[in-house]
Each structure stands twice: as C-alpha cells, then as structure tokens.
Image (cartoon, rainbow, N blue to C red):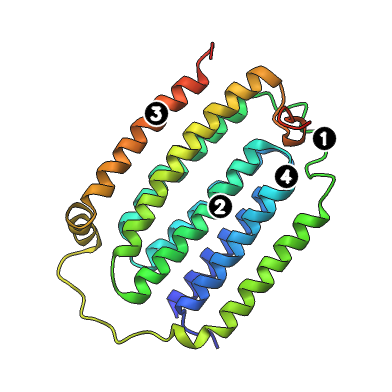
Amino acid sequence: MLHPITTSHYLVLSVALLLIGTLGILLRRNVVVIMMSIELILNAVNLNLVAFSGHLKTLNGQVFAIFVITVAVAEAAVGLGILIALFRNKETVLVDEIDLLKW
Amino acid sequence: MLDTILFYSFALLTLVGAILTVSLRNAVYCAISLVASLAGVAGLFLLQKAEFLFAVQIVLYIGGITVLFLFVIMLVNLDQTAHQPRYHRHWLVPLLATAGAGALFVAFLTKGRGLLALPAPRPDEAGGNIERLADMLFRDYLVPFELASLLLLVAIVGSVMMARKKV
C-alpha cells in the first residue's frame, strides 16, 4: 500500500535533483547546458525551502524561495549575456576550450 | 491517496526531465527537458499548497528563463558542438565526488529521519496563500524585497551591457 507523503520524501527528491544538477555542471562541456544544471540546483533548493515551509507551518520558506527565484532570474540573464559576449570573441561554447586564464 | 499518486508522478516528471537535461546531446532538447523538470517542480509546489510559487514557477521559469535559453541556443551556433563529445575527458573524478556527496546526504537523511516528525499543526491563519505571502513580504521582508528590485535593475543593465555589440 502507498505510504502518505511526508517531508522526507520531498527532501530525498530535492537531494536527487541537486545531485543530478551537480553531475550536469561537472560533466557537461556545453556552457548552456551547465547553466541549465544551475537552474536545476536552484530548483532543488526551492523545493527544499517550500517543503520545510509546509513542515513548520510558516511562510518564511516560501518568501525565501521567491528571493531565490529572483536571484536565479538575474543570474540567468547576466550569465546568458556573458555567454553571448564570449561566443562573439571565442567562437566556442565548450568549457574546456575556454582556457584564457590557464597557463 | 491522491496526494501520494500525484507526488510520485510529479517527482517522476521532475527527475526524468532533469536526467534528460544533463544527458541529451542537442541543447534544444535539453531546454525542452528542462521545461518538463520545472513543470514537475511547479506541480510539487502546488501539492505543498504554495499557489503563488506555482504561478511564479510557471510564468518565470517555464515562460521566461527557458525561452531565454532557447533564444541563446539559437543565437550561438551549436551545430559544430553537436558532433563533439558531450562530457569531459575526466569524467571519473566528478562522478566519484558526486557519489560521495550523495552518500553523505543519504547518511544524514537516514540519521536525522526521526527529527522530521511533524509538529502539532497550527491552526491555519485567515486568508489564502497569496494574501498571507503578500502580508509577510511587504511587512517583515520589505527591505530585502526592495533590495531584490535593485538587484534586478543591476542585472538588466548588466545583461544589456554584456550582450552589446562592442564591449
């Protein structure tokens, strides 16, 4: 029989999403996909905040999730702008070919 | 009962979308899978009775950020990357690091599971989710709220500066 859903279920799901996002950041070569993985990680954080907000019966977690979403939007906008500038100069979006800071 | 089924279906949507996002070859398909994953998270928000965040997730993430991603994918020519390997040459170390972090999380979650027993439910305050959220946002969190608007302004100016023709 199916168990009722508790906060632990949400935490496990959030951890899984976080780990998938981490793998995407560390393994993929394409910068666009790496930024998508960052969005996945921020979504895992939001899921965690909302789950604890429901667990503790306060709305503080949801307010924090709103702020996290704000920062995620700002990060995505600036990051994609940087990416376009980078592509214009280097003609590549693969992270291991962007090695100007390497010696 | 219905909650359980809905939770598992949304969780499945989220996880499958996330796995496809990090594993598909074509970046456009990655963005589409990201939409699926974000929609699953939106459904989970709705299950947690966070209606405002559900709407924000749909409008901002699915309607805004993924469209931005798709625009950038179209702008940068990704054809030559489609035939190159997707993953780094050094794939073992990130895999081991992530597995270690996962083991740590699993250990913490199993150890602290007893602490997650629900407290006695407080009586629900008057008003729906959005009203109470607005009260809290404009009363207790007014200064961070205004700072967030400043951050958004800086981000707008910054992204326009970055994407300009001559930097």
Secondary structure under tag 4 reads loop
Given the image, what chain letter belongs to the residue carrying mark 3? B
Residue A12: quarter of image: bottom right
Report if the CB atoms under discs 2 and 1 are less than 8 Å apart: no
Q: Is residue A20 visible?
A: yes
Q: Which residue is mark 3?
A: B156
Secondary structure under tag 2 reads helix
Amino acid type, callout 4: Arg
Q: Residues within 10 Å of mark 2 (few under 14, many from 20)?
A: many
Secondary structure under tag 3 reads helix
Q: Which residue is mark 1?
A: B84
Disc 3 from disc 2: Cα separation: 22 Å
Amino acid type, callout 2: Leu
Question: Are discs 3 and 2 located on one and the same chain?
Answer: no
Give the residue drawn at x 82%, y 39%. Answer: B85
Question: Are discs 1 and 4 located on one and the same chain?
Answer: no
Residue A1 image offset from top left, x and y in percent: 55, 88
Q: Is residue B163 left or right of residue B137?
A: right
Give the residue drawn at x 45%, y 83%. Answer: B116
Which numbered dot is residue A40? 2
Disc 2 from disc 4: Cα separation: 14 Å
Question: Are discs 2 and 4 located on one and the same chain?
Answer: yes
Considering depth in this image, is B120 or B9 the residue closer to the camera? B120
Report if the CB atoms under discs 3 and 4 are less than 8 Å apart: no
Q: Identify the residue at the far front of this view.
A: A103
Disc 3 from disc 1: Cα separation: 33 Å
